[in-house]
């Protein structure tokens, strides 16, 4: 009887220890990892680089591309940045951001290095001035090159804020986009079962990655010649430079 009680007590303690370990793992999984504290750019660097490119600084509590050039004048690309301290697979990502009139940027995830540009591998949550971008920039040549011959001067739904750029459009009915120069918030939730794009507290897009439908979309538009686009299941978080000012703050991620 004593042996039986001792065995039962031992099993109970093991269950308690296992339960504690499980709870500890779940707690860590639900913790936010702060990627920018408002003052230090630690962890951030150029895509394919070791330091931040010129223009990217911490200023007034924001991670910003601080330039007077503005609005893609002499835009050559190559100043995209990543949080290079860690790769992430399944996650919930949150950030606050604002753009100037006519501004353009984006949030990359599952970024892999060794390519010319992040978008050769990484899906992009689009950030752009939906209202004014096409008024300031001539999109005709670009859209025509993609086969958009009807009203090629317009910003297409696949190119607008909160869309999965050139893949899945955000639902315009659920979009609340604050005026230019105001802060907006964006959230991306990624799991193999479903991807969600949120804008200012509203879910405006959801899709399932790597399905037959996903591959059809990928192979029928902008990414049809980008063999490695969207295929990686883990990678870096990144921000796009389009040579116009952009501000990010409250940048954090939660592992799922």
Image (cartoon, rainbow, N blue to C red):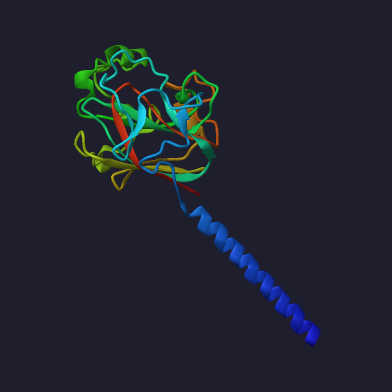
Query: Relative to 34, is 99 above or below?
Result: above
Query: Relative to 186, is 75 above or below?
Result: above
Horizontal relation, residue 185 to residue 180: left or right = right
Q: Quick one: 156 or 44, which is closer to the camera?
A: 44
Q: Position of residue 244 (x, y in %)?
A: 29, 23
Q: Position of residue 193 (x, y in %)?
A: 50, 45
Q: Position of residue 48 (x, y in %)?
A: 51, 23
Query: Relative to 12, is 38 above or below?
Result: above
Q: Quick one: 186 or 81, which is closer to the camera?
A: 81
> Which residue is at 53% across, 26% downward?
113
> Which residue is at 47% across, 40% downward?
208
Residue 166 in view here: yes
Horizontal relation, residue 32 to residue 65: left or right = right
- Give the quarter of the image for residue 160: top left
> Which quadrant would the N terminus be assigned to in this image?
bottom right
> Which residue is at 50% across, 24% downward?
49
- Give the quarter of the image for residue 171: top left
> Which residue is at 29% across, 23% downward?
67
Number of numbered discs visible in the structure rendering: 0
Residue occupying the far bottom of the picture:
1
- Give the quarter of the image for residue 38: top left
Horizontal relation, residue 91 to residue 68: left or right = right
Q: Position of residue 187 (x, y in %)?
A: 37, 43
Q: Quick one: 133 or 206, which is closer to the camera?
A: 133
Residue 95 in view here: no
């Amino acid at each position: 009887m004593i042996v039986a009680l001792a065995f039962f007590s031992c099993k109970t303690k093991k269950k308690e220890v296992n339960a504690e370990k499980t709870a500890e793992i779940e707690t860590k999984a639900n913790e936010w990892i702060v990627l920018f504290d408002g003052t230090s750019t630690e962890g951030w660097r150029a895509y394919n680089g070791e330091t931040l490119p010129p223009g990217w600084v911490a200023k007034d509590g924001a991670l910003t591309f601080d330039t007077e050039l503005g609005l893609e004048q002499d835009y050559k690309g190559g100043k995209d940045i990543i949080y290079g301290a860690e790769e992430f697979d399944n996650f919930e990502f949150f950030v606050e951001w604002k753009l100037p009139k006519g501004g353009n940027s984006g949030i990359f995830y599952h970024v892999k290095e060794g390519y010319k540009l992040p978008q050769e591998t990484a899906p992009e949550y689009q950030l752009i001035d939906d209202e004014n971008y096409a008024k300031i920039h001539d999109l005709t040549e670009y859209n025509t090159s993609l086969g958009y011959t009807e009203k090629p001067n317009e910003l297409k739904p696949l190119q607008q804020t909160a869309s999965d750029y050139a893949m899945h459009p955000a639902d315009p009915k659920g979009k609340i986009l604050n005026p230019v120069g105001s802060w907006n918030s964006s959230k991306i939730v990624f799991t193999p079962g479903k991807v969600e794009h949120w804008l200012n507290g509203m879910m405006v897009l959801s899709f399932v990655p790597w399905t037959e439908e996903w591959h059809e979309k990928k192979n029928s538009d902008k990414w049809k010649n980008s063999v490695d686009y969207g295929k990686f299941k883990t990678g870096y978080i990144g921000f796009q430079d389009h040579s116009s000012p952009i501000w990010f703050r409250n940048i954090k991620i939660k592992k799922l």
